[in-house]
Structures are given as structure tokens and as C-alpha cells.
Amino acid sequence: MKGLQDYYPEDFAHCYGCGRENHHGHQIKTYWDGDETVTHYLPKEYHIALPGFVYGGLLASIIDCHGTGSGSLAIARERNIELTEFNAPRCVTASLKVDYHKPTPIGVELEIRGTIREIKGKKVIVDAKVFANGVMTVSGQIIVIEVPEGFAK
């Protein structure tokens, strides 16, 4: 199953967090799961803050990219856009707020879930939560803005 990021055109597919063309990056994929968006990510052993725990900057990064992917999915759904090769709406982050609730253990697959709070024109507000072993460890709010075609050229 393809993630939203697989539908970005090549000029928008180089993001360190979600770009399919960035082979050194995280390459996260975002999907619909009912009315929520979901991303799964397994941090590498070197993504540590302290032994046994995930680095907070990585957590912010995956929330950020999950938010832009969620915003793009929300815009596509609202406009009834059927995703095909390289036609996905593209969003960039306007604001990112991250709250750390509990240490996030390393060595387990993380699940990032997003809820679309608001869509207003080209602006989407996404609430995200990171779960490790079913326990919410991090939450965030991402405000994303749709960018016009050719923005990254």
C-alpha cells in the first residue's frame, strides 16, 4: 500500500523525514485509518537521547512530517482528489508545537496518529500523538499550508 508521500512529484520528494527520493532520510509514509491518519516508524538504535530512549528531535521530526502528510491527505479528501502518480496536494509546516509526556523507549515501532482539527482554504491544523507499545508519549499540533504547483522548483 502506498503512503501519501508516494504521490508527491519528484521535486517535492526529497524531505529528510518523508521524501521517497532521500535514501538517507526516514521515509515515513502516512495513510488514512478511518477518520485518523497513521504513520508507523521504527527508530534506529542511534536515534537515542539517553540509552534506551528516543531522541526528542527525531520525535518532533516525525510529528512534523506526519502533519504535512496528514494535511495533504485532508485537502485531497476534501476536494475529492483521487491520488494517482504525483498529483498529491503538497503542504509545508507553518507551525509545530510538540509536548513530551513520557520518555519514548527505543527498539519498538512507533505509531503516530493524526486528527484533522480544521481545514480552512490552504491551511490545515493537525493534532498528532505518538504511541510506543500503546502508550502515548508525545503529542503535537501542526499547522500546515498547501503550497502551489512548482513551489519547490
Image (cartoon, helix red, strand yellow):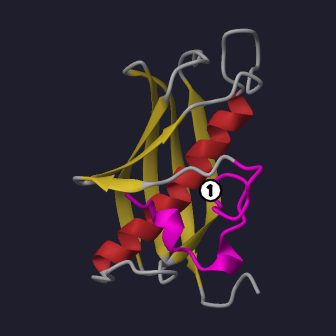
Question: Which residue shows up at 50% across the image and 27% down it?
Answer: 109
Q: Position of residue 74 (x, y in %)?
A: 37, 68
Question: Which residue shows up at 24% across the image and 54% down it?
Answer: 35
Query: Of 25 and 32, which appears nearest the observer?
Result: 25
Q: Amino acid at mark 1?
A: Cys
Q: Position of residue 56 (x, y in %)?
A: 69, 29
Numbered-mark total: 1
Q: Residues within 10 Å of mark 1 (few under 14, many from 20)?
A: many
Check if residue 6 falls in the magenta segment.
Answer: yes
Position of the N terminus, as image quadrant, is bottom left
Q: Is residue 80 left or right of residue 25?
A: left
Q: Position of residue 44 (x, y in %)?
A: 68, 28
Q: Is residue 78 above or below residue 25?
A: below
Quadrant housing residue 11: bottom right
Quadrant housing residue 83: bottom left
Query: Of 114 and 24, which appears nearest the observer?
Result: 24
Q: Is residue 87 above or below residue 14?
A: below
Looking at the rendering, the stretch of residues picked out in magenta corresponds to 1-25
Farthest residue in the left direction? 34
Query: Would you name the residue on which mark 1 appears?
Result: 18
Farthest residue in the top direction? 51
Magenta stretch: dominant secondary structure: loop
Position of the C terminus, as image quadrant, is bottom right
SS type, badge 1: loop
Q: Position of residue 101 (x, y in %)?
A: 53, 21
Quadrant housing residue 47: top right
Q: Is residue 40 above or below residue 116?
A: above
